[in-house]
Image (cartoon, helix red, strand yellow):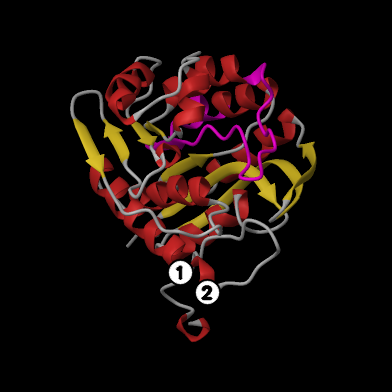
Amino acid sequence: MTTPIALTIAGSDSGGGAGIQADLKTFSALGAYGCSVITALTAQNTQGVTGIMDVPAEFVTRQIDAVFDDIAVGAVKIGMLSRPETIEAVARGLRKHEPRHVVLDPVMVAKSGDVLLQPEAVSSLKEHLVPLATLITPNLPEAAVLLDRENEIGRGDMETVAADLCGLGAGAVLLKGGHLGGSDSSDLLFDGTAYRWLDAPRIETSNTHGTGCTLSSAIAALLAQGLGLADAVERAKAYVFEAIGHADTLHVGQGHGPVHHFHAFWKELE
C-alpha cells in the first residue's frame, strides 16, 4: 500500500485560517499526508495582514528539492507566491521534478482586502506557472486580472472566461463564482472540452477565511488519492460547503473567522 501525499507550496498564515495551515488541515481531514514548502511568512489574523516577509527564492528551491528527493508526492497545491523570483523558482522545481498533478490557486488578495501578489508578479505567474498547472482555481476578480479584463464578470460570461483562461495554457480551470452574489454559489469547471457547473446554496456567515485555500488543497488531496479531476473537484466543493456550514461553531478572532476544516471530527463543539 502507498500513502497518498500532497505538497503545499504557499505562504504561512499566523492566524491559522488560510495558507499553509489551512492546506495541511485540509490534507489531513481528507486522508492525505501533507508536506509543505513555505514561500512567505505573514503576520496575519482574522482582521487583516500586518506584515509579509518573503522566503528567499533559493531557499524555496531547497525546500522543493528536499521534499521531492525523498518523498513520493502525488499532487501539488500552489498558493501565495508574491514575487516573480519566487514564482520562477517554483516553476523550475516543478519542471525538474514533474509531479503528476499541480493545482494552482492564484492568490492575489486576502479576505481582509490586503494585497498578497505584487502587480509585477502577475505576468510571471501567467508565463511560468499557469502552463504547468493541471488545474487553476481563480475567483472572478483573479480571473479578470489574469485576462487583463476591465469589465465585471457575470454568470453569463463565465464559460467564455473559463475558455480564455485555458487558453493561457492550463490543463483545466475551476472558475469560482462566489463573487456573483445572490442565493447560490456557482462554480464552473472547464477541462478544455466540456463545461460542468457546480451549484450550491450560499451559506450566510462571515466566517469564510481560507475558503479558496481550502478548496484548492482539498482538490489536491483527492487527486493524490487517485480520483479523477471532475470527481476530485466535486468532492472538494462538497467538503468546503460543509466546512463553511460548520464555521460558526468555531469562535476564533474578531474578524473573518476560519472555516471548520475538522467539522467531521470535532462533534463535541456542536
Q: Which mark is residue 246?
A: 1
Q: Residue at x 58, y 45 (%)?
A: 67
Q: Nearer the viewer, residue 8 or 202?
A: 202
Q: Quadrant of residue 153?
A: top left
Mark 1 Cα-neighbour bin, 10 Å: few <14, some 14–19, many ≥20: many
Distance between mark 2 and mark 1 Cα atoms: 6 Å
- Label 2 residue SS: helix
Q: Nearer the viewer, residue 112 or 69?
A: 112
Type of the residue with mark 2 = Thr
Residue 222 inside the magenta-drawn segment = no
Q: Mark 2: few, some, or many residues within 10 Å (few <14, many ≥20)?
A: some
Magenta residues? 93-121
Could you say whether the residue bearing mark 1 is in a helix, strand or loop?
loop
Which residue bears the numbered disc 2? Answer: 249
Q: Provide residue 233's location: percent of width, then percent of height.
A: 31, 46
Tell me the residue at 66%/32% (across/down).
61
Q: Quadrant of the N terminus?
A: bottom left
Q: Main secondary structure of the magenta part?
A: loop
**193 is higher (above) or lower (below) than 237:** above
